[in-house]
C-alpha cells in the first residue's frame, strides 16, 4: 500500500496484462522504466507490433543493469517467464533475462527482414540450443546453407530443439543437392512417434520433397499420405499430393517425348546414312559407266584406225609391192623423161622408153618400156 504509484501501475500491468496502457511516466521512470520496457516489448511481440517491440527491447538490452538484476523484477516477479517461438513452431519457456529478451528481439527483427542485424545479436549470445536454433534459422533465411551445416555438425537428436536443428541441417543438404545426407538427417525423426506431430510432419514433408527431387514419385506420395493418415485436417497436403501426381505425369510425358525425339533422330541419321550410301553407289555406278564408255570409245577409235589402215593398205596398187632397186638405173644411161601428160602417153605407144609421170598416181614417175608401164618408179626426174 505504501508503494509508489508507478510501481503499483507496473505491477498491475505485469500481473494482468489487461490493465490500461502504462503511463509514460512509468516507462521513463529511472527505477521502473527498464522493467516496464521489457514487459511492453514482450507484449508488442505477441501482438505483432514488431517495430515497437524492437525499440522497447533494445532499450532494455543495452541498458544497465541487466534485466535479471532489476529491483522490480526480483522483488515482485522473481519467477516470471515467457513463452517464445524460436523457429518452425518450436517454442520454449524462458526466464526474464537479457539473453531471453535478445532472442525475442531477434524474432521481431527477423519478422522485419532485418536478418544481418538479428544475426549480430544472436552471435553475441552464449551458445545454447535455443540460440543455435535461432542462428541456424537466420542463416537459412539468408540461404547460407554451408554455415547451417557447420553449426549443426555432430549434434545429437534428442529433443524438440535438436530435432528442428536436424530438419534445418537436412534442408541445407537438400539445397546443396546432397540428397543422401539430407535423408540421413531425417531418420531419427521419421523412425518413431516420440517427437511431436509438428516435428514429424515437417520431417515427412521434407523427405517427400527429397524423393520428388530423386524422381521417386511413389515414395514422395507415400510420405505425404502418412501425414494425411494421421491428421487429415492439415492444409496443403492434398494439394501437395496432387502436385506430385502432376510432376510424375509431366516426367512421363517428357520421357515419352525424349524417346520419340531419340527415335526420330535415329531415323534421321539412318536415312542420312542411307542417302549417303546411295549417293556413293550412284557415283560409283556413274564412274563405272564413264570408264566403260571411255573404253568403248577407245576401242571404237582403235577399230576405226585399224580399218582405215586396212583400207589404205588395200588401196595400194599391187605393182608397188615389189622392191625397186634404183642402183641399176644409175649404171644405165638415164632415159629421157618426157613431160608429156600421162593421159597422152597412155594412147601413144610410139613413145620411147623412159620415165614419165605415173598415170596411176602411186609414184611421181614410172618407167615406160615403149609398150607398157613397168613396176619401176622414181621419186625425182
Image (cartoon, rainbow, N blue to C red):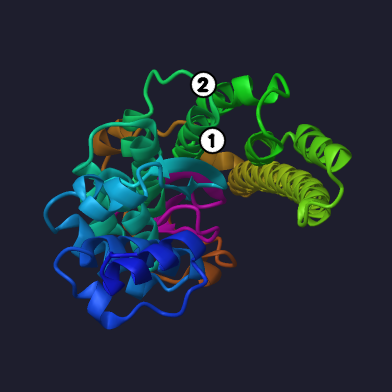
Residue 300: image x %, image y %? 66, 46
Task: Determine whether the residue tagged by mark 1 lies in a helix, strand or loop.
Answer: helix
Residue at 40% across, 38% down:
133
The residue that appears at 18% across and 72% down in the rendered structure is: 29
The disc at residue 157 is: 2
What number is the disc on residue 232? none
Residue 211, above or below 3:
above
Neighbours of disc 1 within 10 Å: few (<14), some (14-19), many (20+): few
- 2 and 1 marks in contact (CB < 8 Å): no
Task: Say which residue appears at 34% left-offset and 39% top-offset.
Answer: 131
> Rounded to the nearest whole Å, what is the CA distance between mark 2 and mark 1?
128 Å
Q: Quadrant of the N terminus?
A: bottom left
Q: Residue 71: tell me if it is visible.
A: yes
Badge 2: how crowded within 10 Å, few (<14), some, or many (20+)? some
Q: Which mark is residue 321?
A: 1
Marks 2 and 1, the one that precedes in the sequence: 2
What residue occupies the far left of the structure in this picture?
64
Answer left or right for 215 relative to 132. right
Compared with residue 267, is residue 108 higher up or lower down, i.e. above or below?
below
Q: Where is residue 303 drawn, in percent x and y?
A: 66, 43
Q: Is residue 235 left or right of residue 186?
A: right
Residue nearest the observer in this picture, 360 or 197: 197
Q: Which region is colored magenta?
A: 353-381
Does residue 354 appear in the picture of this structure?
no
2 or 1: mark nearer the eye: 2
Q: Nearer the viewer, residue 9 or 191?
A: 9
Amino acid at each position: 500500500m505504501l508503494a509508489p504509484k508507478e510501481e503499483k501501475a507496473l505491477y498491475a500491468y505485469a500481473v494482468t496484462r489487461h490493465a490500461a496502457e502504462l503511463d509514460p511516466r512509468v516507462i521513463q521512470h529511472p527505477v521502473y522504466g527498464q522493467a516496464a520496457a521489457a514487459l511492453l516489448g514482450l507484449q508488442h511481440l505477441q501482438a505483432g507490433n514488431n517495430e515497437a517491440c524492437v525499440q522497447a527491447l533494445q532499450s532494455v538490452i543495452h541498458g544497465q543493469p541487466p534485466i535479471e538484476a532489476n529491483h522490480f523484477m526480483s522483488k515482485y516477479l522473481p519467477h516470471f517467464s515467457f513463452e517464445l517461438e524460436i523457429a518452425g513452431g518450436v517454442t520454449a519457456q524462458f526466464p526474464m533475462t537479457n539473453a531471453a529478451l535478445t532472442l525475442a528481439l531477434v524474432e521481431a527483427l527477423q519478422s522485419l527482414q532485418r536478418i544481418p542485424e538479428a544475426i549480430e545479436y544472436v552471435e553475441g549470445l552464449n551458445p545454447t540450443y535455443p540460440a543455435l536454433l535461432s542462428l541456424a534459422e537466420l542463416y537459412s533465411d539468408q540461404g547460407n546453407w554451408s554455415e547451417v551445416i557447420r553449426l549443426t555438425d555432430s549434434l545429437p537428436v534428442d529433443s524438440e530443439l535438436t530435432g528442428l536443428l536436424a530438419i534445418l541441417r537436412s534442408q541445407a543438404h537438400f539445397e546443396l543437392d546432397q540428397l543422401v545426407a539430407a535423408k540421413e538427417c531425417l531418420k531419427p525423426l521419421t523412425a518413431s512417434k516420440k517427437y511431436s506431430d509438428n516435428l514429424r510432419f515437417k520431417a515427412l514433408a521434407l523427405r517427400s520433397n527429397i524423393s520428388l527431387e530423386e524422381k521417386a514419385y511413389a515414395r514422395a506420395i507415400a510420405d505425404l499420405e502418412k501425414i494425411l493418415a494421421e491428421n487429415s485436417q492439415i492444409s496443403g497436403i492434398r494439394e501437395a499430393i496432387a502436385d506430385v501426381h502432376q510432376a510424375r505425369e509431366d516426367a512421363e510425358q517428357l520421357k515419352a517425348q525424349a524417346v520419340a525425339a531419340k527415335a526420330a533422330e535415329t531415323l534421321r541419321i539412318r536415312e542420312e546414312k542411307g542417302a549417303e550410301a546411295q549417293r556413293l553407289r550412284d557415283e560409283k555406278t556413274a564412274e563405272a559407266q564413264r570408264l566403260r564408255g571411255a573404253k568403248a570409245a577407245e576401242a571404237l577409235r582403235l577399230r576405226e584406225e585399224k580399218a582405215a589402215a586396212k583400207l589404205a593398205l588395200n588401196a595400194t596398187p599391187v605393182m608397188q609391192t615389189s622392191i625397186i632397186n634404183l642402183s641399176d638405173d644409175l649404171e644405165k644411161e638415164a632415159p629421157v623423161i618426157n613431160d608429156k601428160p600421162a593421159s597422152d602417153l597412155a594412147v601413144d605407144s610410139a613413145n620411147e622408153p623412159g620415165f614419165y609421170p605415173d598415170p596411176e598416181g602411186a609414184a611421181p614417175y614410172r618407167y615406160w618400156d615403149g609398150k607398157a608401164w613397168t613396176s619401176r618408179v622414181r621419186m625425182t626426174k
